[in-house]
Amino acid sequence: MTDTILVLIEDTLAPVDVQHLLALHEGEELAYHVLVPADSNRPLLSTIVDNLGLGEFKDALARLRGKEPTPTEAKATADEQLSATLAEFAAAGRAATGEVVADDPLPALRQAVTDGDAREVAIVTYPHAWLDTFHQDWASRAREALEVPVLHLYSGTSELG
């Protein structure tokens, strides 16, 4: 049976992100299963801190005013991100499967680890100043909850979180 790498993402993986993931297990035959949360309920404080830190003042103001994607909009965005990410895996010569999961991806991640032959979890996100600092990010939470190795990569870079 082929081992599975679970990949939790917050945005479409770029070709460089897929290459970084594949390079971690060069020469091995692995299955990749991608999870994309339909994120319609972002935490207020951490989102504003991230927006301000990145100079995204318009986005910070919109969030402060309560602008959130509707569940339908969040699901549509997650579907697009999943489709594009699976296409990036295919372009790199690797098949991958995936699914859109709930806003909080940890229950789905826990279930996927329990149900399958997950060897490890790779989480690819942008840096989040507040969540990363206070260990409330997906990777920190997954490390506490799961009994498999959890790797946190920052999107578009080879930096580890």
Image (cartoon, rainbow, N blue to C red):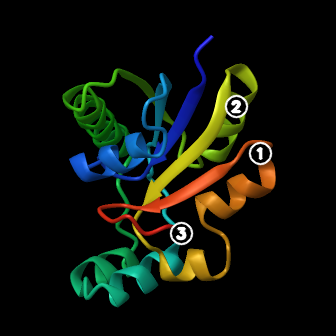
Q: Nearer the viewer, residue 115 or 38?
A: 115
Determine whether 45 is above or below 101 in the image: below
Determine whether 128 is above or below 116 in the image: below
What residue appears at the point 32 percent right and 25 percent down from the top-left corner? 94
What residue appears at the point 57 percent right and 26 percent down from the top-left corner? 4
Judging by the rendered image, the residue that carries numbered circle 1 is 146
Q: Which-is-in-front pick, marks 3 and 2?
A: 3
What residue appears at the point 73 percent right and 55 percent down from the top-left corner? 143
Secondary element at image label 1: loop
Label 3 or label 1, whichever comes before in sequence order: 1
* Res. 58 image quadrant: bottom left
Secondary element at image label 3: loop
Residue 161 numbered tag: 3
Label 1 or label 2, whichever comes before in sequence order: 2
Q: Position of residue 127 (x, y in %)?
A: 44, 73
Residue 113 numbered tag: 2
Q: Nearer the viewer, residue 150 or 53?
A: 150
Residue count near mark 3 (Cα–Cα under 10 Å), binned few <14, some 14–19, many ≥20: some
Q: Position of residue 65 (x, y in %)?
A: 36, 78
Q: Is mark 1 in CB contact (under 8 Å) with mark 2?
A: yes
Can residue 71 be seen?
no
Residue type marked 3: Gly
Residue type marked 2: Val
State left or right for residue 43 relative to residue 149: left
In three-dimensional space, the C-alpha distance between marks 3 and 2, rounded to whole angstroms, equals: 21 Å
State left or right for residue 95 relative to residue 147: left
Label 3 or label 2, whichever comes before in sequence order: 2
Determine whether 52 is above or below 157 in the image: below
